[in-house]
Image: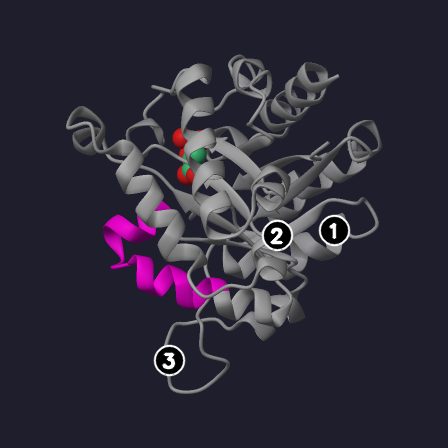
């Protein structure tokens, strides 16, 4: 049985005090959910250390929203795996569609980040997902297969098993227009089949897959009920403790 995992992508939101307050509200309630569900908070870089310190001992993990593949040097504006570990991260989001669309992320740079992260001991949440035009053109499965193959290229089975894959259709992110549970599960199956081709059926059944895209407390159960969906990557609704708690509760209730 795969363990549920809910992650919050705070994007470019929350100052240090606001982030500590949000992390603290969740940490103070963690006893209610942490035995049944992994919870990962991904603040902006500036708030990682303070949030990690505040949630320490609660069982909640902290992750970053991106990482560079080089270990150090003249890479102005970039952050290394060692720096993230040093700040208290255990996870890192890689290949978010906003980075692919706005900051030149490619399958190749996603793959470099994946390799660097697992080598350093950071667990990747790697994002894949098609645009609306790609879905309308019947290309969704091909696009996601290509992104999965690109992300995992050259990773050993052991390293691949540490990753979580977040299926995030681009048209569902921040739009209020979530996928249906059925469609999201169908794509989760495509992702598992691709991982099985790359490695083995056993590994593909062990990898955890999240759905992301306009997840709210009110629609989480639809995704959590799907057999191939093990959690969610949550943007907007991760910014308020009550909403994020509602999503965690829906995840746990639906899997019981
Ligand atoms: C995201 O950015 O990963 C995301 C899923 O955003 P939202 O939940 O706001 O759609």
Query: Which residue does the image show at 63% across and 42% down from the upper left?
Result: 202
Q: Secondary structure at mark 1?
A: helix
Circle 1 packing at 10 Å, graded few (<14), some (14-19), many (20+), is: many
SS assignment at label 2: loop
Residue 162 spot, x, y in % from top left:
62, 54
Q: Residues within 10 Å of mark 2 (few under 14, many from 20)?
A: some
Residue wearing tag 2: 161
Give the quadrant of ligand 1.
top left
Query: On the image, which quarter does residue 122 sit in?
Result: bottom right
Q: Which residues are magenta?
A: 96-114
Q: Nearer the N terminus, badge 2 or badge 3?
A: 3
The residue singled out by tag 3 in the image is: 75
Mark before the other along the chain sequence, 3 or 1: 1
Residue 98 is covered by the magenta coloring = yes
Q: Disc 2, disc 3: CB below 8 Å?
A: no
In this picture, residue 66 sits left or right of residue 254: left
Which quarter of the figure is the C terminus placed in? top right
Picture coordinates of residue 110 (x, y %)? 38, 60
Which residue shows up at 56% across the image and 47% down it? Answer: 200
How many numbered circles are shown? 3
> Can residue 4 be seen in this snapshot?
yes
Specify the quadrant that holds the N terminus.
top right
Quadrant of res 214: top left
Does the magenta stretch mainly form a helix, a strand or a loop?
helix
Mark 3–mark 1 Cα distance, whole angstroms, equals 30 Å
The numbered dot on residue 54 is: 1
Q: Is residue 68 above or below residue 58?
A: below
> Could you tell me residue 57's position as x and y percent?
84, 50
Nearest the eye: 85 or 169: 169
Q: Earlier in the sequence, mark 1 or mark 2?
A: 1
Horizontal relation, residue 204 to residue 88: left or right: left
């Amino acid at each position: 049985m795969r363990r549920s995992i809910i992650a919050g992508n705070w994007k470019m939101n929350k100052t240090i005090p606001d982030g500590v307050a949000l992390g603290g509200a969740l940490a103070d309630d963690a006893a209610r959910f942490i035995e049944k569900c992994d919870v990962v908070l991904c603040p902006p870089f500036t708030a990682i250390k303070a949030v990690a310190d505040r949630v320490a001992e609660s069982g909640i993990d902290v992750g970053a929203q991106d990482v560079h593949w080089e270990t150090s040097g003249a890479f102005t504006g970039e952050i290394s795996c060692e720096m993230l570990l040093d700040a208290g991260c255990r996870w890192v989001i890689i290949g978010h569609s906003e980075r692919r669309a706005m900051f030149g992320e490619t399958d190749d740079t996603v793959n470099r980040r994946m390799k660097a992260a697992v080598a350093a001991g950071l667990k990747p949440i790697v994002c894949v997902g098609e645009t609306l035009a790609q879905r309308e053109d019947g290309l969704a499965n091909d696009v996601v297969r290509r992104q999965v193959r690109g992300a995992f290229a050259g990773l050993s089975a052991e390293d691949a098993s540490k990753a979580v894959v977040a299926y995030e259709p681009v048209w569902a992110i921040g739009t209020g227009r979530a996928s249906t549970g059925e469609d999201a599960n169908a794509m989760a199956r495509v992702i598992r089949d691709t991982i099985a081709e790359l490695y083995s059926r056993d590994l593909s059944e062990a990898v955890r897959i999240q759905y992301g895209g306009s997840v709210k407390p009110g629609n989480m159960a639809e995704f959590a009920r799907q057999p191939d969906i093990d959690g969610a990557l949550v943007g907007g609704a991760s910014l308020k403790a009550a909403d994020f708690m509602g999503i965690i509760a829906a995840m746990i209730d639906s899997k019981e």
